[in-house]
Image (cartoon, rainbow, N blue to C red):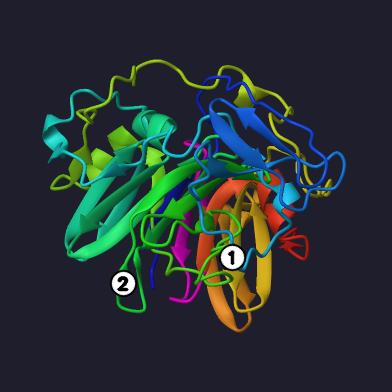
Amino acid sequence: MRHGTEIPYRWTTSRVVLGMFITLTAAAVVSVMGWQVLAQDAAPGGRPVVARTASQAPLFDLSNLTVPASEILSGGPGKDGIPALTDPAVVPVADAGFLALADRVIGVRIGDEARAYPLRLLMWHEAVNDSLAGVPIAVIYCPLCDSVSVIDRRLDGRTYTFGISGLLLNSNVLLYDRTDDALWSQVGLTAISGPNAGRTLRHLPWELAAFGGWRTANPKATVVTFDTGYDRDYGQPAYGDYFRNDQLLYPLVREDRRLPRKDPIVGVKIGATTRAYPVRAILKATDGIVRDTIEGQEIVLQADRESLTVRVVEAPPEAVVVYTFWFAWGAFHPETEIYDR
């Protein structure tokens, strides 16, 4: 698989989200924003899992949970409080006057079709269930760790649709699938509960780029519009100074201090090997090109010093490639290697 992935190194400002932490002892149940919060196995000082509504109807399938329930936090909004989109409205790229040339978009190409997903929209929705060139995909973005991934929604003959659970793990969004109500971790790369626990979906190539560059490179592409049916101010910056400082809004299960918390990295997983490529290291490489090998497979990254972007030029089909802040990658993958040549 050849990736044309451009990832912006500089970032625009976004909004401050107020987190809510609740300390519970084991099996304690309290009411939070109208929900019943159940800390199934939380030790003293642990945080709760939102598991049931006030009527005790199950919200999520927590069977086969691969992490302690005490490590999962409520992000504030409940299930679908952040509304994921499905089959969004699109327009030809030439008609996307609602975007500025500098606006960041996630670009996806499959076959002869290309589509851009504005980050100003994903800040408010975090996931878009879509189809491109006949392939059902989900485009996922978590503002808390600036993480981007695109997945094929098919597994074992089923096509899954994803919503936002309102829960977090390592300050990263937990999605849920509307088939089993099971939880899936974006940066963790797998389902963490339900019948598919421990499994991953196929990751697809993508790029994170300024809209102006994307439009020039993809004149026949389409763009997802702000006509979502939701009353959101997509022109309003979303996270204030969060991207400019070292502070986190939610605690981590573990923290790896080998790199600064919010260093942007490209995380790659092939087989049993995970490796982080700091964007600053790619920028410092000779001619801005890094050629590396993971388990015998070649990875090629290229950085542009003027635009401060990086492209994943080449990676094998089985590679999982995610852009995120270091703190999230290090928390989910403590065994990760760091490219430092």
Q: In front: 298, or 203?
A: 203
| Image quadrant occupied by the N terminus | bottom left
Q: Is residue 86 left or right of residue 306?
A: left
| Quadrant of the rendered image containing residue 127 | top left
Q: Residue 40 location in percent, x, y?
A: 71, 51
Q: Is residue 112 left or right of residue 19?
A: left
**Residue underneath mark 2:** 158
Question: Which residues are the magenta region?
Answer: 303-319
**Residue underneath mark 1:** 63
| Quadrant of the rendered image containing residue 29 | top right
Q: In front: 61, or 238?
A: 61
Alpha carbons under labels 1 and 2: distance apart: 20 Å
Q: Magenta stretch containing residue 305, yes or no?
A: yes
* Identity of the residue drawn at 83% across and 49% down: 258
Whether 72 is drawn above or below 314: the answer is above
Q: Earlier in the sequence, mark 1 or mark 2?
A: 1
Please tell me whether mark 2 sits on a helix, a strand or a loop: strand
Residue at far bottom of view = 296
Please tell me whether mark 1 sits on a helix, a strand or a loop: loop
Mark 2 Cα within 10 Å, few/some/many (few <14, many 20+)?
few
| Image quadrant occupied by the C terminus | bottom right
Q: Magenta stretch containing residue 173, yes or no?
A: no
